[in-house]
Amino acid sequence: MRWALGVVLVTSTALAQAPPPSPPPPDARGTELVEQARAARAALERRKPPKPQGDGRKFVTKQLGPWLTEARKLHDEALARYQAVAASLASADLRVTAHAEAGEMSLALSERIYRAGEAATPKAIANDPELRAAYLSALDGAVEPMRTAAVQALARCAELATAHAVSSPASRRCAELRDKPMSIDPKRRASPAEVERAIRLARPKLRACYEDALRSDPALAGDLKVGIEVGPSGAVTQVKLSGSLSRHAVAACVEGVLRKLPLPAPPPGKKIVMTLLQPLVFDPAK
């Protein structure tokens, strides 16, 4: 009996003196998946769009089209790897990182596609303001699904970071790009073309102004001619509206949207004063 008790006491003493258990190993599988995704993303970033040359139609079919096909394939491969991290049992830190990097990658590619298409605008279209606006609008529409999916991923990333108290460069990048997706291009500067593009992208908000007004005036229709001034910081400092709806309440809503356009700063020391060539047209049938 004493011998058995002695064994128990020795064993208990040994356990009491044993070092504390070592921390669990890092999330090796999650880290491996992130590195695989980064390698696939690096392959995408090395695939630069071709520079426009020669006949526009031939350039698009022979060079720009194949680049776009390959870029989308590389993007989807990398995205699948990032999504594997986000769906796994990886730490919240790693999942935030995966969402942030995937969203940033998709935003960057959508902008690269837009810029490549813009640079390849056929001369016959580029020289006609109305055709050019329609062409660029279609181009933005083509990349909108990718851009929207990226912003949604970044919003989930920000929510995940908040829920798990993750404070890291990745979590901050999520919030930054969610709120200002066009800041993905650090070289972007405000210009008349960029102002026009920002207004095109704000069309859902502008349309909402009009649809709200339709509730009290179902036959409301007309146009607004827009003049805008953009200050050195990129903030819209002045909006001038004229046209058939300029004295209607819808104009005040439109002005509020335009004053909040997410624009980058113009070139150093400059501001932009411009009038849109095409007015904003509001019609119940459209």
Image (spheres, rainbow, N blue to C red):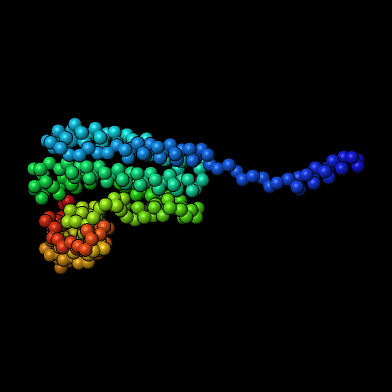
In the image: residue 276, left or right of residue 79? left
Residue positioned most to the right: 1
Most extreme residue toward the front is 268
Instruction: Between residue 40 and residue 76, name the one nearer to us.
Output: 40
Q: Residue at x 16, y 63 (%)?
A: 273
Residue 37 point in image, percent of width and height: 41, 38
Q: Tell me where residue 108 appears, x and y as whole percent.
A: 31, 45
Image point 17% across, 39% down: which residue? Answer: 52
- Residue located at (25% from left, 59% from top): 265
Measuring 26% from the left and 57% from the top, which residue is drawn there?
264
* Residue nearest the viewer, comparing 248 with 62: 62
114 up-or-down from 242: above or below: above
Vertical position of residue 230 compared to residue 164: above or below: below
Residue 36: percent from the left, percent from the top? 43, 36
Tell me where residue 271 sits by quadrant: bottom left
| Figure quadrant of residue 141 | top left
Compare residues 144 and 9 and report the one nearer the observer: 9
Q: What is the tally of numbered marks visible in this picture? A: 0
Can residue 209 be seen at all in this image of the molecule? no
Left or right of 267? Residue 38 is right
Can residue 118 be seen in this snapshot?
yes
Placement of the N terminus among the 4 image quadrants: top right
Give the vertical position of 34 relative to 159 (above or below): above
Counting from the top left corner in percent of width and height, residue 10 is at: 82, 43
